[in-house]
Image (tube, rainbow, N blue to C red):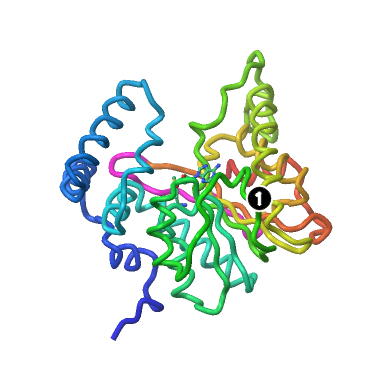
Amino acid sequence: MLTTQSLGPRAFLKSLGFALDKRPHQIDRLLLKSLSPGDAEALRMIWSTRNAGFSDGLGTYLIPKTLKQAALQFSYDWPRAVATMDWFDEVVRRLGPTSIVEMGCGAGFLLGFLRNRDPGVHLQGVDAARNLVDIGAALSGHALIAGDYLAAKPDRAYDLIVCDFGFDMARFKPSTTPHSIAACAGAQYCPGCSDDLKVQFDAYLRAWRRWSHAGSHLAVAGRLSNFGMLRAFVLAASDAGWLPCLQVSTVLTVKHDQDAERFPALLFVPAGADPEAPDMEAIASFFNR
Ligand SMILES: C[S@@+](CC[C@H](N)C(=O)[O-])C[C@H]1O[C@@H](n2cnc3c(N)ncnc32)[C@H](O)[C@@H]1O
């Protein structure tokens, strides 16, 4: 008999109710059908205002109240969730942390997966959407923290801080610096956009660092979809005392319905732990290869 512990990410998500074989319009229908009439109406309104460009659509996070609803809500993104779960699993196996905290844990899918893989690891998660955190409590086995991780008070120091698409680029302000073009190892970017984003990432990295101890690692996968964004994140991490480890980091490509999405999955080690910390040219080459 298969135990959930032996399930890979895809089978694990399926066991939670993810609609893996459905097209987006079919997921829309299943999700609406799973909701109360009031929540279905609220979701339709969020979709309409988002599609018309009047809102960022982040209100969709507040809709799911049950695991089934959350699984359907996140089903649009399942190839990404499978790819990143696989990578985080590899990182955890390599590092063997005794404690892990996830920033922007949503409904706790990654925490639930990691718990099944190794029930001995102490897991925690933080998310701004209380409804998702309440769902995640059942998956992770205990109450998670509801709140803005930029302000939340750490409950202890963790060996590994993870963030699996747990930040939303829609929350970041556009750059106010005039555009220009620079290149680093062949990767073109706008220095003003990258520098202005770095200042905003500083607040994230400083906040996440507060959940760590001197030897903690950081593992992050997210929509850093061009080199300027990656540069901004790496510079902010470096200022927070974390340097990228390119041997364990990778660039993942996943197919969504018709499109393909490419994004980095990055392991950061505590500054001082890796004598061969890569320079920005090596990071650009890693991203472009
Ligand atoms: C794209 S979802 C990903 C959720 C989850 N990591 C997953 O892969 O299923 C982004 C999540 O990050 C959370 N988030 C974004 N910014 C946050 C912040 N400043 N504090 C707490 N949670 C945040 C959102 O509430 C949302 O649940």
48 with respect to 286 (left or right): left
Q: Quadrant of the N terminus?
A: bottom left
The x, y position of residue 26, in whole percent, is: 17, 45
The foreground one among 270 and 248 is 270
Quarter-of-image position of residue 42 = top left
Q: Is residue 143 above or below residue 45?
A: below
Which residue is depicted at the point 71% across and 45% down? 206
**Quadrant containing the C terminus in the rendered view:** top right
Q: Residue furthest bottom?
A: 1
Q: Which residue: 33% across, 27% down?
A: 50
Asked whether, in this view, residue 6 is left or right of residue 232, the answer is: left
Rendered view: 135 above or below 37: below
Compared with residue 268, is residue 61 higher up or lower down, i.e. above or below? above
Numbered range of the magenta stretch: 247-259
Q: Nearer the viewer, residue 276 or 111?
A: 111
Whether 104 is among the magenta residues is no
How packed mark 1 is, by other alpha carbons closer than 10 Å (few <14, some 14-19, many 20 or more), is many
| Image location of residue 31, percent across then percent down | 22, 47
Q: Secondary structure at mark 1?
A: helix
Q: Name which residue type carries label 1.
A: Trp
Identified at 47% across, 68% down, the residue is: 142
Q: Main secondary structure of the magenta part?
A: strand
Q: Which residue is mark 1?
A: 208
Residue beneath the point at 39% across and 70% down? 8
As for residue 250 lying within the magenta part, the answer is: yes
